[in-house]
Amino acid sequence: MFSKDIGIDLGTANVLIHQKGKGIVLNEPSVVALDSKTRKVLAVGEEARLMLGRTPGNIVAIRPLRDGVIADFDVTEAMLTHFINKLNLKGFMSSPNVLICCPTKITSVEQKAIRDAAQRAGGKKVFLEEEAKVAAIGAGMDIFQPSGNMVIDIGGGTTDVAVLSMGDIVTSESVKAAGNAFDQDILAYIKKQYKLLIGERTAEDIKIQVGTVYADGRNESLEVRGRDLVTGLPRPVTITSQEIEQALRETIGVVVQAAKNVLEKTPPELSADIIDRGVIVTGGGALLHGIEQLLMEELKVPVFVAENPLDSVANGTAVMLENIDRLSDL
Ligand code: ADP
Ligand code: MG
């Protein structure tokens, strides 16, 4: 039977949808713009992201999944429904199965609500899966064998570290040190150092364009604008890679520590496998300059960044949907 099963990476920063036979058909930021009084949804995804930090008083633009927990459930549901409806699933001959990867820390009530929302939007069977597991699969690991595989998924709200064997998570840890926290660190650094207030999107630009987590690993600078805290007027400053390396040191330390904790809790046979196979880094944070070198030095195991780390989970859903018989209704 012809079916267009879909896999959804419901991330804290980005939502990606993979459709069987088509590839990634949707890739949008997890942002929703609302009327602050009526709570009516005004825009979703990229359109809403452009409004972040730029809205007049009657509109708010929010990231409903921000810290890896569902901060605002109704809005998350509206967002999910909006994205699925964009695919027009209801017009198909047979309704598709839907596999959703959502943050590990959501409650069972929230899981049920996500499942219901997907069903209402036209899903036949709805499966929920753990993100770290699907990211590992999407990054090309064969996690179904009886050997240890380690993945570090650095997303927007959380970093999830997991060791997998025989298709399941053996040990794991989730910390709130990830992309958003890096941006906040940069914002705080510039505020303290230059008495200058910059926006979150500017902080993210700095992170991507000049940032590094490896001391002396990068040598670039960028002029950015912000609002002078004393005069209240716009003012430019030039930020260097060295400064950002310092600003990110503490938060990246939390990521490193989480990985060390997981390694410590890992049974020795599996640790031996990880020394052979190495660790794979996925999620947008895997693109942080210097991450590979830093983790390699700290963990003393080989470290590889996944090929398209932002797409790992979405690509992993594709592999899982091929093996849909093996998935159980959770
Ligand atoms: P989530 O799964 O939580 O939605 P993603 O895996 O999509 O998160 O990653 C989003 C995060 O990756 C954001 O914080 C973004 O700033 C960060 N990111 C994206 N590209 C880069 C880059 N080139 N360098 C550093 N960080 C990046
Ligand atoms: Mg993710």
Image (cartoon, rainbow, N blue to C red):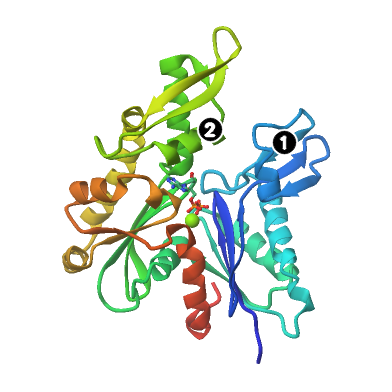
> Considering the numbered disc 1 on the image, is that residue within a helix, a strand or a loop?
strand
Q: In which image quadrant can residue 83 be found?
A: bottom right
**Residue indicated by mark 2:** 202
Q: Nearer the viewer, residue 124 or 240?
A: 240
**Residue indicated by mark 1:** 60
Q: Would residue 64 appear left or right of 316 to someone viewing this image?
A: right
Q: In which image quadrant can residue 62 be found?
A: top right
Give the total number of marks visible in the rendering.
Answer: 2
Work out which residue is located at the far right of the displayed protein and give it.
38
Real-space CA distance between mark 1 and mark 2, rounded to the nearest whole angstrom? 19 Å
Q: Is residue 243 above or below residue 314?
A: above
Q: Would residue 75 appear left or right of 307 to someone viewing this image?
A: right
Give the crowd class for mark 2: few <14, some 14-19, many >=20 residues within 10 Å.
some
Residue drawn at x 50%, y 26% is 224
Residue 69, given in percent of the width and then of the height, sits at 54, 48
Q: Is residue 299 above or below residue 214?
A: below
What's the residue type where badge 1 is placed?
Val
Q: Would residue 136 appear left or right of 97 to someone viewing this image?
A: left
What's the residue type where badge 2 is placed?
Thr
Residue 15, labelled with which disc? none
Mark 1 vs mark 2: give the one in front.
2
Q: In which image quadrant can residue 221 be found?
A: top left
